[in-house]
Image (spheres, rainbow, N blue to C red):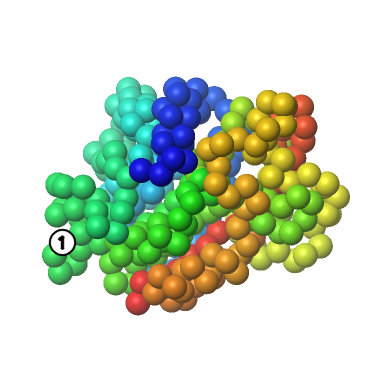
Amino acid sequence: MSNIQAINNDHFNKTARDYDAFPQALEMTKHGYAAILEEFKAATSEEHVKNATVLDFGCGSGLCAFKVAADVKHLVGIDASIGMLEHMNHKLHTQEENTGIRDKIKTVNHLISMEQPLPEPEYSQYLKGEDAGFDLVYSTYVLHHIEDVQGVIDVLSKTLKKDGWLIIVDFENTGKGHGHGHGHGHGHGHGHAHAQTQTHGEGCKRRDGNNEESDKTHQTAHEFFKGEGGKAVDYVAHKDGFKPEEFEEMYRKAGLVDVSAKHCFGTHLTMHNKSVWVDFMVVKGRRA
């Protein structure tokens, strides 16, 4: 386990019980899960979505997983943070609103690798056999926490069925201000910030390069990833965010086709009384 992975695990284990109370976590979840479902539905049929087996990589406390699970047949949530998974399972089995999805969701505490993308018995259950793999693998606000992003994309692409889709939502580096934050995440949003959303419209639409809110903003997600006293947080690996073309190239290197990346939404987040505009993108690709 890398040092930053250990730091991430410690951070999210400690914050798991309070995570859902962070306003930005709920705001980012709303847009994140909508983007995942929108892109998946656009790529396949309604019947396929309804019968899909899905992997949520870095499921955290289940904020996105609970939403996506309602639209699919079965969802596996995987996370390296045992604290996050314990909180997710507690909510799943105690909150009345989750009654309808309890039998659809399975959680797995695991740090993925090419040698062991899933542990046993899940490896044999989901990744062995003629029709093995997931119809959809997705991740929301996680990859910026991971040093070896290409390595993770390579592993996740191998867990897809033929014609399965890998869809990721994460911070977009638009090149404005100080840059947008890359980082490693186990869920949705980072830190104790408040969201004041001003989106670029419903759904995920390609940036037109002339967004008034974003152009006016002099701060970026790089500033968002600063903690008390202005010191950069140590649990984020990519504090400047990802450029869409970078992700597209990583997808292609992993052997995926029909690859596309586009701007998804933007929002103001307030950290330590400083309002920061951040942009997000959605990236997708298919296993040929």
**Extreme front residue here?**
3
Q: Is residue 56 left or right of residue 267?
A: left
Amino acid marked by disc 1: Lys
Task: Check the image and report above or below for 39 versus 186.
Answer: below
**Residue 38 visible in the snapshot:** yes
Q: Nearer the viewer, residue 2 or 138?
A: 2
Task: Check the image and report above or below for 80 versus 163.
Answer: above
* Percent position of residue 8, x then y: 46, 36
Q: Nearer the viewer, residue 80 or 28?
A: 80
- Kindly identify the residue that appears in the image at 65 percent across and 37 percent down: 232
Tell me where residue 137 sits by quadrant. bottom left
- Kindly identify the residue that appears in the image at 35 percent across and 77 percent down: 288
Q: Is residue 21 left or right of residue 122?
A: right
Q: Which residue is mark 1?
A: 128
Tell me where residue 131 sits by quadrant. bottom left
Q: Nearer the viewer, residue 24 or 235?
A: 235
Task: Check the image and report above or below for 234 versus 123.
Answer: above
Few, some or many C-alpha atoms within 10 Å of disc 1 (few <14, some 14-19, many ≥20)?
few
